[in-house]
């Protein structure tokens, strides 16, 4: 063998191979530099507009959980109250595809805690609460509540629980009314400034004064000597419109939850005032048992959930009005006038509901007429103010997978409705007086048998 020829060929081959690899490495370096420049440009453009375009790589941290909420707010875990309580319910959830699931839309102070417990969720529910039998609880796997949207956009249905808008706002007002400044700061520091600015910095300890002083600009009612300031009038109006965040349940209202679901979503609705009838109809609509709820099991299935213990509220002791929910006819009228757009959205939900017929929708509107009169028949454009534009509100608090404003991350650092240890019951007045107060306490204690 001629080793000289072999050495020359090997050297030539090695030279050519080295050149080829050098070209490949050079091309790779150019490509990497180009991609880096593009990513920087995209990031700068995103930051300049206040919206971040989330890349897939940003979602790896919680991808094993499979939570829609964590796909939107990538730095957070799904709060436990959004989940099903029992291990059995959680296992059932894994067997249902996103397109067969039902999203529970929990609008605060509409009776949603009671329904949510029956569906198997954990918000305001005891740990031993059992999920009801039937197709509706099994297929309702995810929840949309206030600033926590944990639903698949392609869900089969979106299940609302609704309540007369005036009754809902009365319940919300009392539910979030603090016992005092120090109590509020100690127990709800995350809400301190917002609630203080409404209930304490302005003379709105009682609903009647909220309407008379704040919404009407009167000097006071039932002995109040306050002359309203212009800033307090603005606070009063923005609170009822849901355009500023003083109370969670007023801010995250019907409009927020309705516009927060996909535009083409199929809606089912349980009316608070007709809870059992609507539950039974939806269960049968899904292919389940026709009358799964009866007068015998309704009390067990729907215990009163999420009461506020009014006995600890000093406002009750000094309340100059007949009961905590008292409103004069004049105040009811002005509240309904300012709730006009919320009433419009309430009716939109009813009319989109696949389980409600014309007679049932008219029944609920007729019941609303008994308190709000002509405003129950107003449609969009008839109200004295335009429908609020809430695109920014939805962007920050509902959130979307492909674009999230930086403020959203900050807004979600402290969770809604932190659990508090139980407090000893303090009786105010005689037992008879306390019993009378309890009957009108702020809660979802609508009487059974729920129109059975």
Image: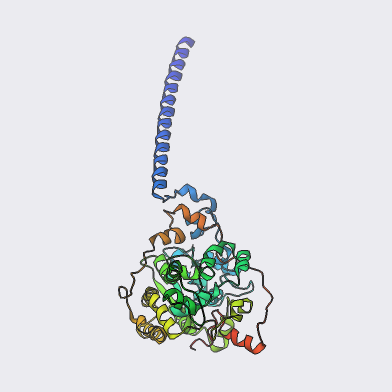
Does residue 431 appear left or right of residue 26 in this picture? right
Which residue occupies the foreground of this view, 12 or 429?
429
Q: Where is residue 42 shown, x and y percent of the image?
A: 39, 43
Q: Is residue 111 visible?
A: no
Q: Residue at the location (39% across, 81% down)?
A: 356
Which residue occupies the foreground of this view, 161 or 91?
161
- The answer to which quarter of the image holds residue 421 is bottom right
Q: Where is residue 115 shown, x and y percent of the image?
A: 52, 76
Q: Where is residue 332 shown, x and y percent of the image?
A: 43, 82
The outermost residue toward the right is: 424
Q: Where is residue 25 shown, x and y percent of the image?
A: 44, 28
Does residue 229 appear left or right of residue 315 in this picture? left
Which residue occupies the foreground of this view, 161 or 442?
442
Asked which colour scheme the image uses, the reply is rainbow
Which residue occupies the foreground of this view, 74 or 141?
74
- The answer to which quarter of the image holds residue 392 is bottom left
Q: Is residue 69 visible?
A: yes
Q: Residue at the location (40% across, 79% down)?
A: 334
Q: How many marks?
A: 0
The outermost residue toward the left is: 381
């Amino acid at each position: 063998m001629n080793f000289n020829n072999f050495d020359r060929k090997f050297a030539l081959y090695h030279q050519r191979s080295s050149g080829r690899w050098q070209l490949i490495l050079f091309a790779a370096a150019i490509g990497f530099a180009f991609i880096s420049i593009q990513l920087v440009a995209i990031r700068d453009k995103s930051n300049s507009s206040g919206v971040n375009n989330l890349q897939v790589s940003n979602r790896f941290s919680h991808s094993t959980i499979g939570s829609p909420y964590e796909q939107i707010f990538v730095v957070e875990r799904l709060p436990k109250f959004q989940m099903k309580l029992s291990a059995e319910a959680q296992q059932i959830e894994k067997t249902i595809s996103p397109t067969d699931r039902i999203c529970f839309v929990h609008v605060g102070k509409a009776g949603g805690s009671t329904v949510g417990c029956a569906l198997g969720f954990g918000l305001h529910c005891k740990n031993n609460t059992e999920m009801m039998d039937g197709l509706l609880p099994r297929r309702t796997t995810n929840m949309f509540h206030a600033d926590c949207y944990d639903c698949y956009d392609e869900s089969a249905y979106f299940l609302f629980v609704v309540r007369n808008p005036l009754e809902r706002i009365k319940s919300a007002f009392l539910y979030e009314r603090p016992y005092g400044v120090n109590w509020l700061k100690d127990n709800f520091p995350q809400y301190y400034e917002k609630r203080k600015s409404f209930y304490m910095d302005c003379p709105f300890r009682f609903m009647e004064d909220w309407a008379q002083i704040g919404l009407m600009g009167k000097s006071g009612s039932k002995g109040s000597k306050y002359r309203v300031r212009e800033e307090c009038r603005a606070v009063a109006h923005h609170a009822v419109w849901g355009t500023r965040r003083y109370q969670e349940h007023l801010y995250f209202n019907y409009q927020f939850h309705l516009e927060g679901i996909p535009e083409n979503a199929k809606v089912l609705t349980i009316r608070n005032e007709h809870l059992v009838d609507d539950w039974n109809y939806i269960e049968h609509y899904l292919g389940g048992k026709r009358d799964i709820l009866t007068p015998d099991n309704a009390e067990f299935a729907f215990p009163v959930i999420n009461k506020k213990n009014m006995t600890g509220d000093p406002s009750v002791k000094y309340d100059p009005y007949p009961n905590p929910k008292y409103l004069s006819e004049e105040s009811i009228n002005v509240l309904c006038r300012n709730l006009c757009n919320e009433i419009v959205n309430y009716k939109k939900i009813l009319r989109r509901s696949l389980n409600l017929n014309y007679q049932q929708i008219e029944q609920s509107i007729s019941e609303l007429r008994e308190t709000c009169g002509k405003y129950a028949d107003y449609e969009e454009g008839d109200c004295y103010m335009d429908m609020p534009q809430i695109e920014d509100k939805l962007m920050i608090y509902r959130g979307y997978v492909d674009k999230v404003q930086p403020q959203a991350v900050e807004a979600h650092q402290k969770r809604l409705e932190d659990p508090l240890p139980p407090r000893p019951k303090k009786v105010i007045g005689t037992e008879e007086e306390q019993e009378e107060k309890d009957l009108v306490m702020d809660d979802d204690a609508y009487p059974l048998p729920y129109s059975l």
